[in-house]
Amino acid sequence: SLERHGGDFVLWVLPCDAMTVHVLTALKLDRLKLVNPLSLQPQAEICERQMKWERRNWLWMLASQLVSNLLKWAACTSVMYLDADCWLMSSPEPVFGEIDCVKACVAVTPHNFPPAYAHYIDRGRYCQCATYFRNEEDGRRVAAWWAERCLEKCDDESVGDQLYLETFPVIADNGKGS
């Protein structure tokens, strides 16, 4: 769906097993760049948590580390993190247009639970599946804060990395929460 609707992009993927690396490499996609999770900084802490934490907690922590690292070393004006199971049904340009219009450095996606699932709000108002960071001081600061919190704790109690998203619109000088 990114090829069809994504416009000009580079797809940075964090494959966490050998099979995924093999399959993605075999696809030979021009705009695909694989990032070894153990190459992210701070490397020692990430490797330590891989050994000590449950696998799902370690995987939850990686999104924040990828975003924070990309904002430091990738030649990009912004990073839009999308979970692997996200599917674009149309161009994301209206979303980027709204973000640009309000000059947001960070944007998070609300869960929008229907009434029957409203009790899940304790898992956070926002969903980590689609988060945006502008590559400027404030965006990098929020991404670094998220990465640091996730290195400290990323478990069921913190709903992985999601409860930290509640703070984004507060700590960002120009964050957007919807």
Image (cartoon, helix red, strand yellow):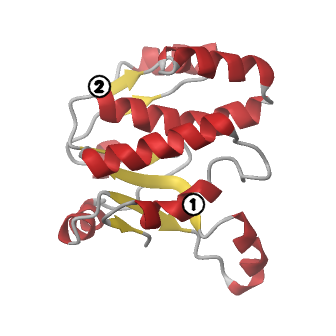
Which image quadrant is residue 151 in?
top right
Crowding at dot 1, Cα within 10 Å, few <14 / some 14-19 / many 20+, comes out as: some
Residue occupied by mark 2: 73
Q: Where is residue 50 in the image (x, y as percent from the top left)?
A: 70, 21
The residue under the point 33% across, 49% down is 139
On the picture, is 134 further left or further right than 40?
left
- The reply to whether callout 2 and callout 1 are in contact (CB within 8 Å) is no
Q: Which of marks 2 and 1 is nearer the N terminus?
A: 2
Q: Which amino acid does label 1 sit on?
A: Cys
- Cα–Cα gap, marks 2 and 1: 25 Å
Which image quadrant is residue 165 in?
bottom right
Give the secondary structure at mark 2: helix
Residue 79 numbered mark, or none: none
Q: Which of 57 and 34 is in front in this view?
A: 57
Q: Position of residue 86 (x, y in %)?
A: 51, 51
Residue occupied by mark 1: 127
- Quadrant where the C terminus is found in the figure: bottom left
The residue under the point 23% across, 46% down is 136
Give the secondary structure at mark 1: strand
Q: What residue type is labelled 2?
A: Trp
Q: Which of 149 and 63 is in front in this view?
A: 149
